[in-house]
Image (spheres, helix red, strand yellow):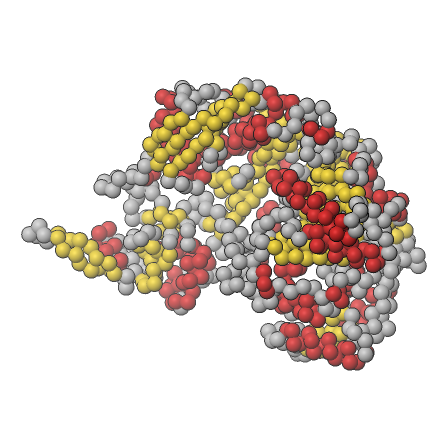
Amino acid sequence: MSALQLTEFVKRPGVGKKGRAIAVKANFFEVKKLPDTVVFHYDVTVTPDVPPPVNRKIYEQFIATYGNKELGGGRPVYDGRKSLFSPRDLKFDSKTFDITLATDVQPNSTRPAPVFKMKIKKVATVNLEELHRFLQGKSALSNNVLTGIQTLDVLIRHKPALLYSTIGRSFFTPDGKQPLAGCLDVWRGFYQSARPTAGKMMINVDISATAFFQSGSLLEMIIKILKLRGPDDLARAPKTVWPKVEKVIKGLRITVKHRERSKRSYKIFKLTPKSAKETKFKVETTKPDGKTTSVETSIEAYMKQTYDIRLQYPNLPCVSIGKTAILPLELCSVVEGQRYQKKLDEFQTADMIKFTCQPPHIRANIIKDGLRILNYDNNEFLKDFGMKISNEMATVKGRVLDAPTIHYHPSSKDANFVPRDGAWNLMGKKVAQGTTLNSWGVIVFSNENAVPMAQVKGFVRELVNTCTDTGMNIPNKTPQILYANPHGDIERSLNQLFQRVGSTVSVRPQLLVCILPNTGVPLYAEIKRVTDTVIGVSSQCIQMKHTREPKKQYCANVCLKMNVKLGGMNSHLSPTAIPFLSQKPTILLGADVSHPGPGDQVRPSIASLVGSMDAKASRYAAAIRIQEARMESIAELADMTVQLLKIFYQTCGRKPERILFYRDGVSEGQFKEVLDNEVAALKKACTQLEANYKPLITFVVVQKRHHARFFPMNRNDGDRGGNCKPGLVVDTDIVHPFEFDFYLQSHAGLLGTSRPAHYCVLYDDNKFQSDELQSMTYNLCHLYARCTRTVSMVPPAYYAHIVAARARFHAKGEQFSDTASSESGVGAAGSFSDVKTELSKVMWFM
């Protein structure tokens, strides 16, 4: 069978051979026995439409009510949405069942419980023989194969989904939960996914974590939201706090304390504008003569009269749980297992990182605990389908690639050296190409009491000395220094400094150094908007705390950023380390799309493209476009590519004969759409420049959002933190059965377990061999300009990610806070400004 028929993408050209061979453990578990029977696929429709957790409860009730009669003792598995898979043919082609949930049945209630209709209709039979052929590389990825993989995914998730809170491919358990700042807990979860690999199916199992609302008293939750000490503080709180509370608790499900026998939960719609004492409604009462009359009463009085409950806090608002139903806050309990879906604040994020950041040996042990919870051996659904899964982590073959020689300025001590363990330092080294900084100024966003002039001058002196030692040339050692109000007109202050510096030196200013009082985003964002899009000058932000006792190491790191922002080059590799770039004119392109946060209906997506500017691949230019929210393909890629190809030509004097395109942030489901649109856009860009200009294109997707992790088997193969050493490449055992992909862990882990990058080659005119692409990708990871370490993904993709994130700050009037409303219209597509052309050939985004 030809490669063309087998895959739309690129067939693996053979496995790599370079590097030192080692064996590592991977968090993949082999499927020892695949179902070899025909599986029956049914479509499920539940009316009225409800979310998956409710669908699952309805399905459980269906099994309890109709299972023996309709399913003949069979055990179908359900995905909670539309698909049901059965190892046996059910006795009907289509049937509708009426189902009432036991929890909806109210004792002594005259109101009938809601009835759900569940329609089950046969849609297909799935022959898993074709999946076996696909794994052997003898069949393409057809719908039948995809449904086969989906069947296994639903099968392994079915039982955990009945027992635990399930989100996507993970299930979460409250065991070992820990509080986050505010009203949230973090729960540990276990992710599992059926993955096709060479010759066999594997189950990828990993740990995950997510934030849930704390269960229990709603009153206590509100006290935590407002960071108060107790209910008395809440009673004294101003009315202006309640909209904030309503925003957090709206949509939460609660149970009530005064109806012990009712298991039903209710959804919070809003808070009442008045308190329980002031909220009045009419109740029907029967007079002694048998006539009914309606009497107005308050919530407080009604609770005392009907349930003999004296409210402790009648002055607090109530919650509305329907069109007319209202409940006092103190009688409500928050139901367990409700996920928090908004953005975490900085304190919650810090707590979350502490919880999730586990060193490799601990992560591996937690995954083994997860396997005990999953208990594949005793899963009756797996047995019914005839599927067996190993309980041992897979041992996979890997190779550790040699690090390249890094070059600094010839006058450096150790000017050319091979780094060890993915890190090195700048001691005695000068940047390969230092820039001259003549015209610059410093602005301190504070007052002279907080940051005395002597302190600022001391810091500037240390910065200048370190930059000079590191190979930059700074003739002007006493720049203009200005103080400014961090809450004032930032644009005016920056313009004022720019004008002063320009008039003093009679040359256009090259750099504004900004000293910031804290790490707050709004001030930083406004500085970058003004310098990038209004003035057109590079800016370097410094935290105020670093100016008190300036450290040489810190100043050296700042120097690396300043040098590339001014057009310099920090380091480069020898041409032999990147022959693909040095043999013919070649451009490296990196692309990413940054999407707005969940629930944001106003902000657009931002597409970024960066391109290398020379054969050394140390300098890049960037292009940005605003596009429709959550659209993954880059809409204006052709225009962006033309822009960067022109800069490449102006810099090198030649057109690139080859394009190597690294694309960040694309999931497997989007490969085809992105490939079709973006390769066509690259070709269009080339023909726009010249009708017969057709450089050879290779298109590689870089994925970081996956769950593959590697664990060294021997201590000698690990680093100090217990991670695999940088340069580990895996292209067998757990990769695609026949397409060209590989995992590369290029960086030395600092905290937790290192996550390798997954590279998938979707298009390849350049006919790369595995060794060639893997080595070059790893070698390029040594050229990230901001630091003296190898990085976790190839720099063009990394830079594209940084540019897309930075471009968010280019919207005028944007509100950068956790509580900012996104309905106001700021941050919409029209409010973004372009980066000034003065910055087009320097790395302003560093």
**In the rendered image, which quarter contains the C terminus?**
bottom right
Q: Residue lying furthest front in this view?
A: 691
Residue at horizontal 79 percent and vertical 56 percent from the top: 646
Q: Residue at x 71, y 30 (%)?
A: 4
Residue 70 image position (x, y, % from top left): 38, 22
Q: Answer above or below: position of 384 versus 224.
A: above
Please tell me which residue lies in front, 124 or 352. 124
User: Residue 525 placed where, x, y %?
Assistant: 63, 65
Name of the residue lying farthest toward the left: 289
Q: Residue at x 76, y 49 (%)?
A: 687
Res 223 → quadrant: bottom left
- Residue 519 in which image quadrant: bottom right
Residue closest to the far right = 411
What count of labels does the image hold? 0
In this view, the residue in front, 160 or 194, is: 194
Residue 409 picture location, percent across and down: 90, 57
- Could you tell me if residue 289 is visible in this image? yes
Tell me, yes or no, if residue 29 can be seen here.
no
Please identify the quadrant where the N terminus is shown: top right
Q: Quick check: 678 above or below 242?
A: above
**From the viewer's perspective, is 600 left or right of 250?**
right
Residue 673 image offset from top left, x and y in percent: 63, 42
* Picture layout, residue 76 above or below residue 601: above
Residue depicted at 86% across the width and 56% down the height: 653
